[in-house]
Image: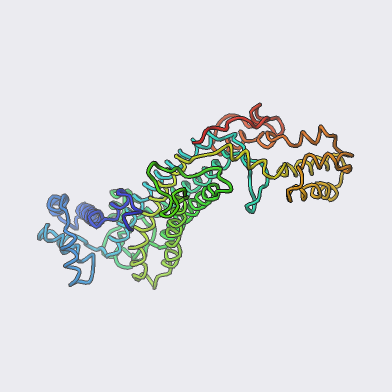
Amino acid sequence: MIPRYSRPAMVAIWAPQTRFKIWFEIEAHACDALAELGVVPKESAKAIWAKAGKVEFDAGRIEEIEKATKHDVIAFLTHLAEFIGPDARFVHQGMTSSDLLDTCLAVQLQRASDILIADIDALLAALKRRAYEYKMTPTIGRSHGVHAEPTTFGLKLAQAYAEFKRGRERLVAARREISTAAISGAVGTFANIDPYVEDYVAKKMGLTVEPISTQVIPRDRHAMFFATLGVVASSIERLATEIRHLQRTEVLEAEEYFAEGQKGSSAMPHKRNPVLTENLTGLARLVRSAVTPALENVALWHERDISHSSVERMIGPDATITLDFALARLAEVVDKLVVYPENMAKNLDRLGGLIHSQRVLLALTQKGVSRDDAYAYVQRNAMPVWRGEGDFLTLLKKDKDVTRALSPVEIESLFDLGYHFKHVDTIFRRVFDESSPVPRSGTGEGDHAKHGGGGHGGSG
């Protein structure tokens, strides 16, 4: 992955030196286990750690050897022998290349998962803080991009929190699924190596034993891992797209922070563009691009082939590095998001009260009017307002069919904004696992909800 979209800790997991260090640890732990079984002299197992345990392996030298051997593991083992000497003959006893490669990949993906989980935790913290900040800030809810009914900006952020919380749970499960070791030898039969070695190495490397491998760890595990990354990336794009919409000039209910000295356009000095969330949309596409090849890697020929190898050498680093960067960027965007409650209030009034149409419809049916008739009464008053011809409340009060069922005071009461927010506390308790009891429906949630005026907050 290019440095522009990379962070050092994740990049380090995929560096050649990290891979060679993990390879050595797997081989050395296997020798320890073989020494316990009497297959390898204990002195040799100790010598392997002593002579190579702190070595900085020479990636250039290994590459030079590989040019001749055309085999990366053999090139590494040859280079390792240059440090260890005669005892190197005990390294890789009964193992096959995939034992080393697949167990190493499991360690790398596990470590990458730990970083990604921490990234999501940081994002969740930012979302929770901002959700509570704007918990009762009224804003318009939209469907199909069109004004629907009132909601709160806090609920928008709480929804994103709940989605990323699910993503975290999936990632934890994917980490567990990918964390298996295979030290089972050619075609996975343990013919030349005792299963005890696999168990020993797995524990030392922080993994569990793969119950049955062929010559490779089954790739359905990896497919599940990358599919999970793809889902998390889609959640990133969902929130990024919402922020981009909210920053549109005609909406401007929220926008990305604009740093001092930042420039929005090379041609138009006034521009403040949603470049960070647009970037996140693109990065999400890249992460998802790893999913299909990971799924196609599941079907290998017979006990194994290496059609998956080139794919994983690319999607392993690229997908995890990209997602790490994207999650960190999104957390920063949320943390510094500039929010405009005054514009939200203006947009709520933009349709002249039409956002209360469902309440009027339901109130009419409660008074005995059929649903079809009630819908017709409400719609015939709504359409002129849609065209900019008057306001909804005034037209309803002039409609004889409506006033036959509802008094002017009753009609006015249906335009109370706070009515829509009486269960915000209940939703927050569900999302954020708060322990206070949930009231029964219809009991109300406090004066601030009834009046809808609390918690507007500042500009963020």
In this rendering, the count of numbered labels is: 0
| Residue at the spot 30% in from the left edge and 59% down from the top edge | 183
Considering depth in this image, is 369 or 47 the residue closer to the camera?
369
Q: Position of residue 368 (x, y in %)?
A: 87, 42
Residue projecting furthest to the top = 447
Q: Position of residue 213 (x, y in %)?
A: 37, 62
Q: Position of residue 442 (x, y in %)?
A: 72, 33
Considering depth in this image, is 349 or 181 the residue closer to the camera?
349
Considering depth in this image, is 441 or 86 the residue closer to the camera?
441
Quadrant location, the N terminus: bottom left
Asked if one can make out residue 37 in the rendered structure from this viewpoint, the answer is: no
Q: Is residue 293 above or below residue 154?
A: below
Left or right side of 192 for 333: right
| Residue at the spot 78% in from the left edge and 41% down from the top edge | 360
Left or right side of 174 for 386: right
Q: Coloring scheme of the render?
A: rainbow
| Residue at the spot 37% in from the left edge and 57% down from the top edge | 210
Q: Residue 187: name its quadrant.
A: bottom left
Asked if one can make out residue 371 in the rendered structure from this viewpoint, the answer is: yes
Q: Residue 77: name its quadrant.
A: bottom left
Left or right side of 57 for 299: right
Q: Position of residue 122 (x, y in %)?
A: 42, 41
Left or right side of 15 for 82: left
Q: Is residue 49 above or below residue 344?
A: below
Residue projecting furthest to the left = 85
